[in-house]
Amino acid sequence: MTTGVYTLHGIDPSPYSVKMRAILRYRRLPFVWDSVTPPREVATGAGLPPVIPVLRFPDGRLMNDSTPLAWALEQAHPGARSIVPDDAGLAYLSDLLEDFGDEWLTKMMFHYRWYYPADRTFAQLWVTSCRNPTMPEAERRTMMKQFDDRQVGRMAMVGCTEQNRPIIEDSYRFVLDTLDRHVRTTPFLFGTRPSLADFGFYGQLMILATDPTPMAEMRARAPDVHFWLLRLDDASGIDGDWLDAAAPLPETVVALLRHCGQTYLPFLAANMRAIQSGDATVDLDILGRPYSQAPFRYQAKCYDALRKKFAALPATARGRLDPLLRDTGCLPYLA
Ligand SMILES: N[C@@H](CCC(=O)N[C@@H](CS)C(=O)NCC(=O)O)C(=O)O
């Protein structure tokens, strides 16, 4: 343990780990990146849920879950280099798109990684090598197989099935095309400085930019997304401004919101209904095709948080947001 600075316990192939690392770098908070101590053991040893990354605060406190962590950093270091737009309406859109990044783009990350043979092998090697890059070959092969079995066994649980594959892949291509257009006109989603939403996208897309199959797709159709990811990876030198909240949003952000209203939000609503009525599956049509998966409790919490935040917005922010969210098909899911 290093005292006086933050320590981020995570690994390079973990989307939420690299998301937090990029946030700490942009925010210019001194930290140690500890990818040596097994991060899951740091979490469980502290009685935290077994997910990574884990952040150790300078006072010794340990916490995980990247969204509450980003907010804890906002509280501890308000003002300069905040990743929450000043305007309450833009801040809400940033929360919404961060959640879309964390919880919907992650389906793409998980699907490509554990569906295609080349990606599976690459991910097994990457994760195993993080544990110990010089592990003897026989041990490495055993660990790779164990990790593969575990992750492939989880695919259906997170909706990565053959049935859902075209929806997930179409959605990946839509996000690539739209974001590629966006970053060639506006450096980040809400201005010339990055928001929480940018970092939510960054975490998943950075992995998709590295695993072989989605990497090839990204480089071929959206090379500027790749360059954007590299800029955001260490944005400590970037100083910028938020968009003018009174001006119309870039058409690309509107398109992303519309896509969220066609994919993630209907999924969240159906997931909530399935949990409330005790159904075994969440079934709905997404992008004109049937989508199905088991209900997911964590995402019911995400949905509840999005709706509560929306209800708590000041009337002035609602006055500007409601027409936009109505037009993009998001409003019925949030209000
Ligand atoms: N909502 C959490 C999700 C973190 C998460 O799911 N992390 C993955 C690795 S990227 C994990 O630890 N999964 C459980 C496991 O692999 O045992 C966050 O934003 O930090």
Image (tube, helix red, strand yellow):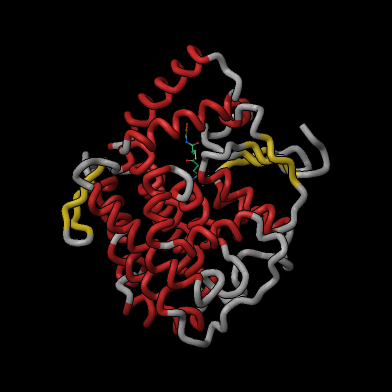
Let me know if residue 104 appears in the view: no
Whole-percent x and y of residue 13?
A: 52, 39
Question: Does residue 238 appear left or right of residue 308 in this picture?
Answer: right
As drawn, 205 above or below 41: below
As drawn, 147 above or below 28: above
State which quarter of the image contains the C terminus: bottom left
Camera-side residue of 95 and 10: 10
Question: Does residue 200 appear left or right of residue 301 in this picture?
Answer: right
Query: Which residue is found at the position 38% from the left and 33% from the top?
Result: 120
Camera-side residue of 181 and 24: 181
Camera-side residue of 18 and 306: 18
Camera-side residue of 157 and 61: 157
Q: Residue furthest front?
A: 220
Query: Which residue is found at the position 50% from the left and 70% from the top?
Result: 183
Let me know if residue 80 appears in the view: yes
State which quarter of the image contains the N terminus: top right
Q: Residue furthest bottom?
A: 247
As drawn, 224 above or below 148: below
Mark count:
0
Query: Which residue is found at the position 61% from the left and 54% from the top?
Result: 233
Q: Quadrant of residue 75?
A: bottom right
Whole-percent x and y of residue 115?
A: 31, 38
Q: Residue furthest right?
A: 4
Query: Which residue is found at the position 44% from the left and 23% from the top?
Result: 144
Whole-percent x and y of residue 188?
A: 55, 69
Whole-percent x and y of residue 150?
A: 38, 26
Question: Does residue 167 appear left or right of residue 151 in this picture?
Answer: left
